[in-house]
Amino acid sequence: MPNMRLTKNEMPAQEPEERAKNFFEVTFGYTAETAMDEAKRCLHCKNKPCVGGCPVRIHIPDFIAKVAEGAFEEAYQIIQQTSSLPAVCGRVCPQETQCEQQCVRGKKGEPVAIGRLERFVADWHNANSCDLPVKAEPNGHKVAVVGSGPAGLTCAGDLAKRGYDVTVFEALHLAGGVLSYGIPEFRLPKLIVQKEIDNLKALGVKVETNMVVGRVLSVDELLESGFEAVFVGSGAGLPRFMNIPGENLKSVFSANEFLTRVNLMKAYKEDARTPVFHAKKVAVVGGGNVAMDAARCALRLGAEVQIIYRRSEAELPARAEEVEHAKEEGIVFRFLTNPTEILEGEDGGVRGITCVRMELGEPDASGRRRPVEVAGSEYTVDCDCVIMALGTSPNPLIKNTTKGLETQKWGGIIADEHGQTSRAGVFAGGDAVTGAATVILAMGAGKTAAEAMDAYIREKQGQ
């Protein structure tokens, strides 16, 4: 019989006052006993609505049934049939708006903790299994993947499982894309990312780092050198700013730069070779997951932190869990507030940020109520550092160096529902197409493109 308890098992975590001072993972994960108990809450619905809410179509009830039995390795094998990064997704995927949102148990209580169970299964496998993935029989075809973020890694893994000779080209010195440079250690330990990449390498995927496609070599040159198809999963790493006075001051950062220094370059360590500015009072502008990550990193570096967001708390795009964690750790939120100028202090730094209060007016094109400035409400927030977390767009480098590649006005590569671009043999997906989105949506795009690339090459060969 199912466990009909209305609430999820709680996720154990570090106490807020403790975790706010370190970069260790905030949550500890379920024990085997807790995971089995949570798994028994699943009703195993015949129509499996949770699967429809998963961009990579994990066989959710099937793996949960194995967890309930204590067959954790079998559960892992079910997950990895469709997901190349289960330990990552179990940590950073917004299950509350995807698979768990579709869970029938959520109609009269809390949904089954699908994400927490996925994390448990992946962590159990990594801790207890020494078996490497089985390398597929080579099919004689060669493909390239540009970018080693979630879209690129998923595409590479799915193609390797089909027998393709896959090479991933990564611009930075470490593979992982946003998983390595964007998401903090306390949310996603980098050993987890490396383990997932090692699993892909065991499948035969080759990874070449320090390869800036568009500079070192181009997509055209990849196609001319023997690669039969190319997937572009280069992400959206070009930061946006507000274009207000003071944004050029030396203690104003994009969230991308700040997080890259902290996460990839370990700038939080005392002996860091590329240290980041240690501010006393930080203002983070934005309300998404990236804003939460930047704010919580700044807090751990010893600053008092405020998040400035122009809409109300109800419109925050960040995950509820991340907002809750930020509040618990002592980060202050200034809602319905919009910056108008960053004030210059000593030596070209920041001494404050001028803001105006906002109120919500009529809905805009996104369906959210448009924030409108309140006349005469200007005031100053005291700070010595500002981090802009306003979203990103794709770097134009690949667009500008690839013949016949059509893009949107804002820079996104135009691709159809299968990932096919305007250039034959070139496919694209993830943030490079949609702009900044979630890890799991990028993975779904990588999976879709892998299927299309396989069909494209088979058609060319008359198979």
Image (cartoon, helix red, strand yellow):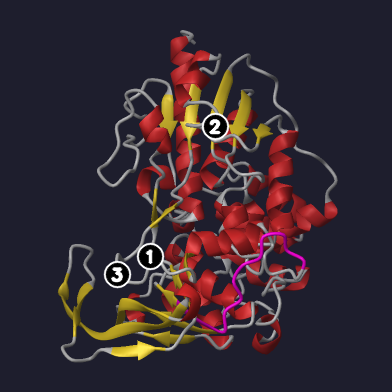
Q: Earlier in the sequence, mark 1 or mark 3?
A: 3
Residue 121: image x %, image y %?
Answer: 70, 58
- Residue 244 - label: 3
Question: Compared to 329, does 173 lie above or below?
Answer: above
Q: Amino acid at mark 2?
A: Val
Q: Which residue was labeled with disc 1? A: 390
Q: Is residue 15 visible?
A: yes
Mark 1 touches mark 2? (CB < 8 Å): no
Query: From the viewer's perspective, is the residue at label 1 or at label 3 nearer?
Result: 3
Determine whether the residue tagged by mark 2 lies in a helix, strand or loop: strand
Q: Which residues are magenta?
A: 271-283
Q: Which residue was labeled with disc 2? A: 145
Determine whether the residue tagged by mark 1 lies in a helix, strand or loop: loop
Q: Amino acid at mark 1?
A: Leu
Determine whether the residue tagged by mark 3 lies in a helix, strand or loop: loop
Mark 1 vs mark 3, CA separation in Å: 13 Å
Mark 1 vs mark 2, CA separation in Å: 28 Å
What residue is drawn where x is 31% and y is 66%? 242
What residue is drawn where x is 35% and y is 29%? 421
